[in-house]
Structures are given as C-alpha cells and as structure tokens.
Image (spheres, rainbow, N blue to C red):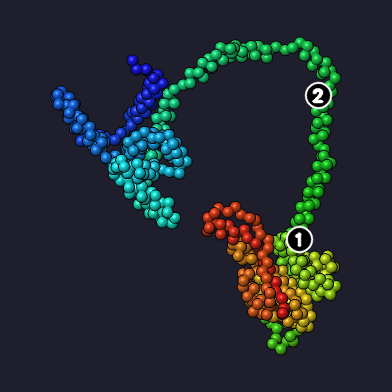
Amino acid sequence: MPEINVDAIMEKIREELSKKKAEKSLKGKPQASEARTWTFIKKAQHKLQEYPFYNVVYKIAFKFKKHISKYKDYASLEDLLKDNGEDFITHAYSGILKRIPDEAGFNLYVSQLKANKLNKLQILGILRYSKEGREQGVKIKGLFLRYFVNVSYRIPLFGYMLRVTTAIVQLPKIVTNIEQSQVYTDQQFAQVSKGLSAKADVQAVDIVKNELKDKADIQAVDEVKNGLTDKADVQAVHEVINQLGNKADVQAVDEVKNELKNKADVQVVGDIKNELSRKADANKVEENKLDILNQQRTITALLEQVKMKLPEQVTKGPAENIVKTESHILDALYVAFENQFRGARADIKERLKVYLPTVEKMKPDRAEASIVDIGCGRGEWLELLEENGYHAKGIDINRMMVQQCGELGLDATEADVIQYLREQKSDSLDIITGYHIVEHIPFTILIRLLDECFRTLKAGGMILFETPNPENLIVGACNFYVDPTHLHPLPPETLRFLARQRGFLNTEILKLHKIKEPDYTNQKFVDEVLYRMNMEQDFSIIGYKG
C-alpha cells in the first residue's frame, strides 16, 4: 500500500482553496465571454459522451485543444472602465490578461491609481499592449486611440495644445455632465433631507424622558415661589427698622438735593471753559487762514493788473521785481505740501545716509570739499553733510524754505539754479547734488543744468541727482503725480543717456527704497506685475567729469 503524504495533500487543498477564493472574488464581475467555437465544442463533447468511440475522438481533440481560443478575443471598454479602485484592477486583469492579478502588479497599479499618477485608461493601455496582453490578443474597441491621445498629453508643449483642443471639443459634453450631476446631487440631497426630517433620535428622546423624571413640576415650583415672596423674614424686618432710626429725615434730604441741583460742578465748568477756549483758538486760526488766502488772491490779481498796465519803456528792474514777487506767493503752500507728503526730517536724513560713502570716496578731505546742493528744500542733506564734517551750499527758489535752513544754521541762498551756476567759475566745484529736482524742470532747462554742472565741476567732479523711478508701476501711474509741480517722469536709462550726451563718464544708476519683496506665484506675467509694483520707488544718476 503506497504511503500517504499528508503534507502534499494539505498543500493541494490550500491551492484549491486559493483558486476557489479567487473565483469567488471575481464572482459578479464582467468576465470575457466564451468564444462560439469553444461553446460548440463543449456541447458536441457532451453529446458524444453517449457513444463508444468518444474516447478515441477525445484523445484526438485534446491534441488540438491548445490551438482553440476558449474566450472571445474582444472586450467592452465601457465595462472595463465602470469599476473603481481595487475592483477596477481585478476586472482589468481578468478581461485583458484572462487571469487574476499577481500581488506585485495589483499593489503597484492600486497605489498609482490612488496617487493620481496613472488613470484607468492608461492602466488598460499598459496591460493591453504589454507582452502578455499582446499574446492574449483581446480586442478592445476604441482603446488604442484614447490611450494614444492620453499618452500624448505628457509630451511637452504638444501635449498641452492637444489637451486644450480636446477640452474645447468636449466642452458641450462637459457642461451637460455638470448639469446632470447638479440635478442628481439636488435630488439626492432632497431625499436625504426628507428622510432625516421624518426620523427622530430615539436615544435622545430616552435621555430627555429620564431627565424629566428627575425634575419637579414647574407649576408646583412656581406656586412655592409665589408663596415665599409673600413672606417676610421677621429678623430682617427688625434690622431694617433699626437702620431707619439712624437715617436722616427724608424731607431734609430732599431739601439738600434740591439745593445741589442749583449748584454747578467747578471742575465741569473749568473743562467747559477750556473747551470753549480751544474752539475759539481754532476758529481764529481758520479765520486767519482764510484771511491770508484772500490777501494772496488779492495780491495776485493786483500784480496781474500792474503787469498789464506797465508802459513799454519802463525799466527792466521794476518789472523783474514784480515778477519775482509774484513767484513767491505760493511758497508757504508748497512748504505745507512738503511737510505733509515728503515725510519727517529724521526719516529723510536716514534715507540720504546711503550717499555718504559715495561722497567720502569722492572727496575724503572734508575741509576742502566744495559741494552745492540745488533745490535744497528743508535742508536735510545740508544738515547731514554738516554732521559728517562737510560744508555744503544750498540753493532754492522757495523763500520760506531758505529761511528755514537759515534758522537751522545752514548755508542756503535764494536763487535760480541756472543763474547761480552761471555766476560760478569754471572748474570750481567738486560735487553737485539735487534730490527730486530734475522732474520739476522742463527738458531744455534740464540740458542747460547738465551743461552748467559740467562747466563748473573740476576734473573728476561728480553729479548726483535723485528722482522718482517710473519703472515702479505705482510710482509711474499715480504717486509721481501727487506733487502738482512735477512735469514728467524720467526713466533711468533716459537720464543716463542725457548725462552721457552732455559729457559725463562712468555713469551709474542706483535704485533705492524698495516697497517690499512680494510673494511670487511662479506665473511669469503675474510675477512680472508683482515685481514692477513692489520694486524701488526712487533712483539716482551718478556721473563724473573726465
């Protein structure tokens, strides 16, 4: 009697159980249909079993079995795509490779599908056009074209254009699907809401019932409360009576109250007086302001009439004095404008410190440096140079600003810039600076200014002009025009070109006062706009006389 191998039998049982389990997991999934030839052979085999020559026929047919296709060589793409997740992978293996998925392949495709690295169409294409898939030869109508287009999406540039074209072609279908999805979602939501409204939480009801059992009847509690409110504690009554005995007579108290009503609180009166005084001062300031403005308008009108009535033979001196006086009428207005929009003196001086190293490099001998600051304004740059051991001369046409510089002990003169420079000797100055001045003067005067600077500077002398940077979109489109005396913005390269054309060498553009570093989006056009809106608000041109 042959020996029974228990281990071999158990291993065989495990294999059969695994097959049964796999078949069970595939139950209900769309499988590849049997080929008609195979179905006919099965039926014929069943009929031939009744005849004695069946064994001979079976042996012959068994040799040709491997050449007969058991299943149809085509599958439905719609059936393969309708499942999701793990069910989809199992169905795809069954329909295309005609087997259950191996563990490694199954886990790979499930992870790729969840991570959105591969879509269902790509997985079907990979399986169908793999070596094993080509051997099985299952035909899936419409797969090749859709798989080819899907793979083409990954080609740089061409894939993007193809995706856009496909989206445009499918746009009507996409809109229809969205509308259908919306209708379905609304229907489902309505059904769920209706179902929820018809149900009550039984557990919550039981809890409420249990709680109510422990509560007292509200009406009974109210009756007890009403009964208690009608009672008075005897001891408390006696205490109140004793306290009343120590109180003042009610009539006397009322008389004191009436007397106090007729008195005014001293502190309140004082506060009212101070408030009225402040209002009176404010009213006086406003009246004085209006009076000054009225006087300015009257003087302007009178000067206009005088100029119109001056005889032609009048001497040049009086006419020039009249024009000069008229030009200073708005000096106070511009000083007030600078105080509000230019910024505090301390802030401006802090910003100008960036130029000190350039001046020190240009003229290390502070005592011998001859520096002129044209359009010196309130004198921040003059004061900063004085604090660092340099002496500079300030020039400005605003009479009030020149007076303010004088009050600070700074050397400033009221003069026209071109006229002042023409009065200076050639090759006599080391440095000429001007902060926010070139945007105030016409083009022809700017050329004269550059020429006079070049003439009066010593060999190796330097010009330094700062002006708003119109490359910044906010400056160029808006902030430049906050000052009504600005004529036109000057781009950096334009000012560099003009300086070079008038003879200055080694010109340098220094951009300053960046707003902030923006949060870029990695979209080229958007990032360019963000950069232009937050870039440096000012720039300076530095040039040297050869």
Give the residue displayed 36% in from the left and 47% down from the top.
147
In depth, the one of 524 and 140 nearer the eye is 140
Q: Nearer the viewer's eye, disc 2 or disc 1? A: 1
**What x and y, as percent, mark residue 11?**
40, 23
In depth, the one of 468 and 60 nearer the eye is 60
Instruction: Using the rendered image of the protein, determine whether residue 179 is visible from the camera's viewpoint.
Output: no
| Residue 59 falls left or right of residue 371 | left
Q: Quadrant of residue 106?
A: top left
Q: Are marks 2 and 1 in contact (CB under 8 Å)?
A: no
Give the residue displayed 39% in from the left and 49% down from the top.
151
Query: Mark 2: which amino acid?
Result: Val
Query: Mark 1: which amino acid?
Result: Glu
Separation (CA) of disc 2 from disc 1: 72 Å
**What x and y, as percent, mark residue 159?**
41, 54
Q: Residues within 10 Å of mark 1 (few under 14, many from 20)?
A: few
Q: Quadrant of residue 38?
A: top left
Q: Quadrant of the N terminus?
A: top left
| Residue 93 falls left or right of residue 492 | left
Give the residue displayed 36% in from the left and 50% down from the top.
148
Residue 446 drawn above or below residue 353: below
**What x and y, as percent, mark residue 441?**
67, 74
Res. 350 mark: 1
What residue would you read off at disc 2?
250
Sequence order check, earlier mark of 2 and 1: 2
Res. 388 mark: none
Q: In the current view of this chain or complex, which residue is farthest to the bottom?
A: 313
| Residue 247 falls left or right of residue 138 | right
Residue 435 drawn above or below residue 520: below
